[in-house]
Image: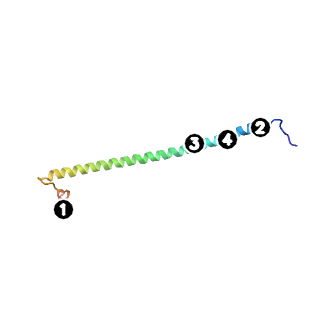
Amino acid sequence: MLVFEKSPWPTLTLIVSLEAIFLSTFVMIGQNRQASFQQAKADHDFVASELELHTNTKLTKLVHQLTTEIHARLVLASDGTPATVGETAGHSTI
């Protein structure tokens, strides 16, 4: 035997409310997973950029050191005419 309610609205309201609760729960779980993925990616990008900055700083210091050494050799070796880098290192240029 089928039982019919006089007014189906309370049951419909309950069903829709439960659906909204479950849907919002699943959406929040998905957002949390996405946020943790984005945080991991941001951490990786930060480490990579710090490593690149360190490498660039080291290379810049080396270039400055080499430039200073070349300039010092050219100034010390000059006796009126500028010398080339090969001559200042004790090697003759071809």
Q: Which residue is drawn at 79% across and 37% down?
A: 8
Residue 10 percent across, percent down from the top left:
77, 35
Looking at the picture, which amino acid does disc 1 mark?
Thr
For the residues labelled 2 and 3, the Cα–Cα distance comes to: 32 Å
Which of the two discs, 4 and 2, labels the residue nearer the N terminus?
A: 2
Q: Position of residue 73 (x, y in %)?
A: 18, 52
**Residue at label 1?**
93
Front position among marks 3 and 1: 1
Amino acid type of the residue that numbered disc 3 sits on in the rendered structure: Asn
Q: Residue 22 carries which label?
A: 4
Q: Which quadrant: the C terminus?
A: bottom left
Front residue (pair 13, 47): 13
Left or right of 2: which side holds 47? Answer: left
Q: How crowded is mark 1: few (under 14 residues within 10 Å), some or many (20 or more)?
A: few
Furthest residue toward bottom: 94
Labels 2 and 1: the sequence-earlier one: 2
Give the residue pinned by disc 3.
Answer: 32
- Find residue 34 and report its image quarter: top right
Secondary structure beneath disc 3? helix
Query: Disc 1 to disc 4, how far (Cα)?
Result: 81 Å
